[in-house]
Amino acid sequence: MNEINKEKSFSTPEKKSKTLIPYAMLCELTHRCPLSCPYCSNPVELELKSNEISTDLWKTALSDGVKIGILQAHFSGGEPTARKDLEELVSHASKIGLYTNLITSGVLIKEDRLKNLYDAGLDHVQVSIQDTDPKNSEKIAGFKGHQKKIETCGLIRKVGLPLTVNAVMHRQNLHNLKNMIELAVELDAERLEVAQVQYYGWALKNQTAFLPTREQLDKATTIVEEARIKYKGILAIDYVVPDYYAKKPKSCMGGWGRQFLNITPAGKVLPCHAAESLNFLNFDNLKEKSLAWIWEHSESFNRFRGTDWMPEPCQSCDRREIDWGGCRCQAFALTGNADATDPTCEFSPYRNVLEEPLSKAGTENPDFIYRKYS
Amino acid sequence: MSKLIKLDIEDVPSLPRHAKLRYDHARKKWIINAPERVFELDDIAGEVMQLINGKDTLKQIIDKLLVKYEDAPREQVTDDVIVMLQSLADKGFLTNE
């Protein structure tokens, strides 16, 4: 999922406020999913159905979310439609004023359920499509469901819901980027997310298969720029580049514990969906603590909040409150030190750790390591 | 997505289904929720958006604003409102249908 864009449309001056107010919560209702994409954003250690929290606990979390200022709830997974209480949760969220978004693979849902979700107040649906070539799409997903996804997109528009196509792009499908943009237009999507794979968790295991070459990336950027002009007012395109090729790190989550929180199927509350990879941190659970308490007081949310934790060169950098030191999970995965400057920053003393993966980009085609329960 | 539109004074503006206006008590301001985006409105923008009801034309909305801000020149209010709403329309968060 994309980071939340905070748009100041009418030149509102930012008011300095002591308590940070989050914008969005990502509700990972379950880790169960028929697909097994090798770049899945779920953690490597997946939660079993037996550990999933109850409908009532989800409802409490949603209500508490509104109280602390959350505006949007994203229902995700795994595959969120695998939970039978999805309609009930969407209805609850909608009634209390949350903007509701369903993030789905689209392979399990039928028209009547989409109608029920529409009636429950669902605001928006995002469907992932792995490639425009059905054979390659199904190879990447590890599941025969490409045609069903296309049909689901049609049904989403038929019942009157706005659609975003989420296209995770990488070396195995970048050659079809133009087709993907045209497919999104054909499917009458409002938005297309062209999201290059980001490398942690499952994706890091499959990095050699997915990391594009510089040449491929530049070509993709040109295609996106041209399509944005061609389809202005028809299709909005969000574009996320792989940060290995950037000079500046991404402002991960808009800063740790500043705008966003994630709830796992088991009820743990995280500053981002990958945060459990920081295995030295203790993450509080909704079974024991309230959402408001966790947001404001927990060790995990305060660990990398603000700028006090930062090492040099971040601490004296004039971008420290723009990119917030980059991604903590990436720093930890690549350097073993979660306090380190993100290695994708040109000023990082660890920049050299990117040399090996970048030198291998495009040279080998290893088999995928598919996402699965261990 | 809604077609690219050029707002006219006789248009009846409305929010499409994927854009929702509401007051946020935590931030104490009006906001528009949209896919992966939040527009935080200042006081005036919040007031203009509240007048958009899918029935009134842009001209009628401006008339209502002029009743409240009687010292403001019509021409300036009209320009400001159109610029603001056109910017939302360009992003697909306002329609005239």
Image (cartoon, rainbow, N blue to C red):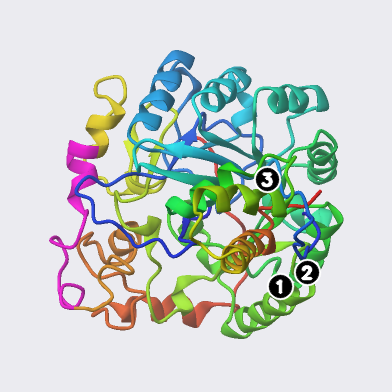
Q: Nearer the viewer, residue A98 or A280?
A: A98
Question: Which residue position is annotated with label 1?
Answer: A228
Task: Identify which amino acid the numbered label 3 is placed on.
Answer: Leu
Task: Tell me whether circle 1 and circle 2 mark residues in contact (CB < 8 Å).
Answer: yes
Q: CA separation, marks 1 and 2?
A: 5 Å
Q: Note whether residue A94 is visible.
A: yes
Q: Amino acid at mark 2?
A: Tyr
The residue that appears at 63% across and 54% down in the rendered structure is B62
Q: Which residues are magenta?
A: A296-316
> Image quarter for residue A172?
bottom right
Chain at numbered mark 3: B
Quick check: A262 left or right of A102?
left
Say which of marks 1 and 3 sits in front: 3
Mark 1 — on which chain does it sit? A
Residue B15 bears which disc, if any?
3
Q: Residues within 10 Å of mark 3 (few under 14, many from 20)?
A: many
Location of residue A225 (image quadrant): bottom right
Report how far apart the C-alphas of labels 2 and 3 lie in the structure. 21 Å
* Closest to the observer, A212 or A2: A2
Provide residue A67's location: percent of width, then percent of height.
35, 29
State left or right for residue A261 relative to residue A154: left
Taking A299 as reference, is A51 above or below it?
above
* Secondary-structure class at tag 2: loop
Q: In the rendered structure, which amino acid carries the disc numbered 1? A: Arg
User: Looking at the image, can residue A266 be seen?
Assistant: no
Q: Which residue is mark 2?
A: A231
